[in-house]
Amino acid sequence: MARRSRHTREELQALIVEATLSLVREKGAGHVTARRIAEVIGYTPGMLYAAFTNLQEILLHVNAESLESLHADCVSAQDGADGPEASLRAMGLAYLGFAERRTHQFDLLFQRMEVDDLSVPPALSQRIRSLFELVERQLATLAPAADDVALQVGARALWSGVHGTAALTLSRQLYIDRPHADREIVETLITRFLDSWRQAPS
Amino acid sequence: MARRSRHTREELQALIVEATLSLVREKGAGHVTARRIAEVIGYTPGMLYAAFTNLQEILLHVNAESLESLHADCVSAQDGADGPEASLRAMGLAYLGFAERRTHQFDLLFQRMEVDDLSVPPALSQRIRSLFELVERQLATLAPAADDVALQVGARALWSGVHGTAALTLSRQLYIDRPHADREIVETLITRFLDSWRQAPS
DNA sequence: ACCTGAACACCGTTCAAGT
DNA sequence: ACCTGAACACCGTTCAAGT
């Protein structure tokens, strides 16, 4: 086949990431192959290696997009909330909701990859930090006297619980027989954490 | 090559699982292949399919072994502890310790597999339940009035936090720059949860 | 210069054929 | 009966050769 079109490297990268993202959403990362990505965008597999160093780097960019969505979901969940506690609850439910609706993306996002020498896209690590900052901000409002370390540790303690609940729900390892158990667990977690946080934030 | 030895199906299964476990420990599940397993035990790859239906089933049995170790670690951590709070703290640290020492096993254990039609080995699901029961028991001691549902939800809320901390630490997504941040986070989590739990367990 | 097409060194899994 | 060896339909990645 002849040359199909002229795309700059950046356009090719965007095409590839978009195609890969849709494959991940539909089938899961396990079914994504270089040959299938190439097929979707109408190129040969070899061409991918002109735009990225390997398949793993492409998946890292998919993760950056996923985290962008997750972050946006959390921010807009907070928008409708009244006060820091409601805000944290809304964020927690949004996080669970993302894990349920975009299961394959969530899986890929938190699955440990062997990142040999690839640079993690800056958008990726930046968005994770931002997520924690959203939590820290609400905790700070609830306890203005808390210092930075307490806020950082507290936000990570609380959010590890939300994340763990989402992760265990997806891997069906929660072993509890109640409808919407995940939401109940996250509600409990947030209630109890804030209970204690309000009394003594340090 | 001629027949090398006579093994019953059960002996073969044990050989295979043991070989696979050691490959997982050394290199991670991503580097485990049917050909490598066969090489370790001195058979041909095809033979694996006389003992198991596929590679995935073998990995499920590896998970059963891993969970056995994790459970044993948690139980023996409790043995040295004085009282329910110390017991939960010791378990939490043991859980983190397992995730750190046996990283590849932990990864495989909580990575979502597409379990087509394979039966999860009963030892596997049973051990997860047992882990939660260890937590429930300590929570019950702290609040004898708590009902079963509160205990189940509480144990999962608390343990999702411990699990989430371990998972985020391994995937380097905690983004906090403190030595032993994971332990600090788990300590915080347990302290705050119990703080609230003691006051109002329901 | 951009992209292809073929190749290389791998996979998981099956199954006829050997012993 | 037990196990092999070869095959099938795939992989990710590279790179000489075409346009």
Image (spheres, coloured by chain):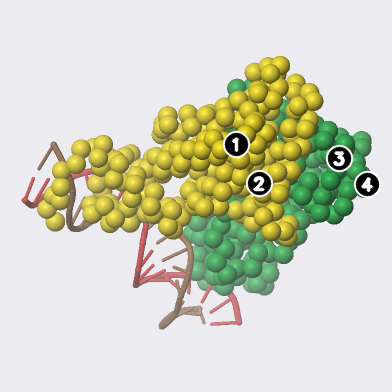
Chain colours: A green, B yellow, C red, D brown
Q: Amino acid at mark 1?
A: Ala
Give the residue at mark 3: A200
State which quarter of the image contains the N terminus of chain B. Answer: bottom left
The dot on residue B81 is 1
Vertical side of B89 occupied by B39: above or below: below
Give the residue displayed 69% in from the left and 59% down from the top.
Answer: B179
Tag in front: 4 or 1: 1
Mark 3 residue element: loop
- Pointer 3 and pointer 4 on the same chain: yes
Label 3 or label 4, whichever lies nearer to me, is 3
- Horizontal placement of A83 versus A170: left or right? right
Please provide percent x and percent y for residue A62: 64, 56
Say which of B184 and B27 sits in front: B184
Closer to the N terminus: mark 3 or mark 4?
A: 4
Mark 2 → mark 1, Cα distance in angstroms: 22 Å
Residue on which disc 4 sits: A144
Horizontal and vertical percent position of residue A148: 85, 54
> What is the distance, in whole Å, between disc 3 and disc 4 at their CAs?
11 Å
Q: Which of the two marks, 2 or 1, is nearer to us in this view?
A: 1
The three-letter code of the residue at mark 2 reads Thr
For the point 77% across and 37% down, the residue is B192
Query: How many residues crowd mark 2 within 10 Å: few (<14), some (14–19), many (20+)?
Result: many
The residue at which mark 2 appears reads as B165
Disc 3/disc 1 C-alpha distance (Å): 26 Å
